[in-house]
């Protein structure tokens, strides 16, 4: 049903429509300004590894990439699912694909991610997939509001 491929420039306009509000964009891409634009995604790509899209036929269903921190740990980033594909297995396929890419292409044995405490659906989803919390840090919304950022990990 789903396939994956490397991000193409032609995918960017569709991906930019996925965040439906400021909260969703903050969960996906905290430094971006709503509404998301293809230019914001492009500007972020030099700091990212393996930008990947999940396809349903010729339609982009979801997107994610990786980044490394100062300790060279690998983090899953910019995870976003089209509203049309939420609750239809696309997100699980995306995370499984990204885990496979991390393991096979990047030789990663542990994958990390960040999920904001206000993203209950995301926290429960990642727990279901085997991710476990290991730290919490303070983040700020563009409005200045405090948000707890839950650091999660999974050994691959």
Image (spheres, rainbow, N blue to C red):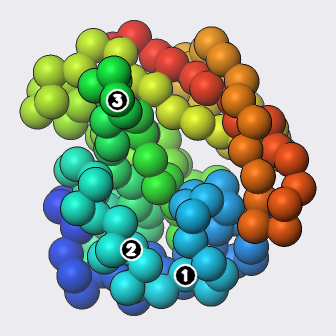
Label 3 and label 1: CA atoms lie apart by: 27 Å
Q: Nearer the viewer, mark 3 or mark 1?
A: 3
Q: Is residue 54 above or below residue 116?
A: below
Location of residue 128 in the rendering, given as x and y in whole percent from the top left corner: 63, 24
Q: Earlier in the sequence, mark 1 or mark 2?
A: 1
Q: How many marks?
A: 3
Location of residue 81 in the rendering, given as x and y in whole percent from the top left corner: 53, 62
Left or right of 134 in this view: 98: left
**Residue marked by disc 1:** 36
| Marking on residue 61 | none
- Report if the CB atoms under discs 3 and 1 are less than 8 Å apart: no
- Report if the CB atoms under discs 1 and 2 are less than 8 Å apart: yes
Left or right of 102 in this view: 115: right
Q: Is residue 137 above or below residue 144?
A: above
Q: Is residue 98 above or below residue 37?
A: above
Residue at image point 31% right, 35% down: 68
| Label 2 neighbour load within 10 Å: few <14, some 14-19, many 20+ | some
Placement of the C terminus among the 4 image quadrants:
top left
Q: Earlier in the sequence, mark 3 or mark 2?
A: 2
| Of residues 142 and 96, the one drawn nearer to the viewer in this rendering | 142
Left or right of 35 in this view: 17: left
Label 3 and label 2: CA atoms lie apart by: 22 Å
**Residue marked by disc 3:** 70
Disc 3 element: loop
Q: Earlier in the sequence, mark 3 or mark 1?
A: 1
């Amino acid at each position: 049903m789903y396939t994956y491929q490397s991000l193409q420039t032609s995918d960017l306009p569709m991906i930019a429509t996925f965040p439906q509000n400021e909260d969703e964009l903050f969960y996906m891409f905290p430094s971006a300004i709503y509404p998301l634009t293809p230019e914001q995604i492009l500007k972020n790509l030099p700091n990212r590894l393996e930008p990947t899209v999940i396809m349903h036929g010729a339609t982009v269903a979801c997107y994610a990439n990786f980044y490394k921190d100062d300790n060279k740990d690998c983090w899953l980033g910019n995870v976003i699912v089209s509203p049309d594909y939420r609750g239809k297995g696309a997100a699980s396929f995306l995370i499984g694909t990204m885990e496979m890419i991390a393991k096979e292409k990047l030789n990663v044995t542990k994958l990390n991610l960040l999920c904001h405490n206000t993203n209950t659906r995301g926290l429960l989803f990642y727990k279901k997939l085997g991710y476990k919390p290991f730290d919490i840090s303070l983040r700020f919304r563009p409005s200045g509001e405090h948000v707890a950022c839950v650091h999660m990990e999974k050994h691959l």
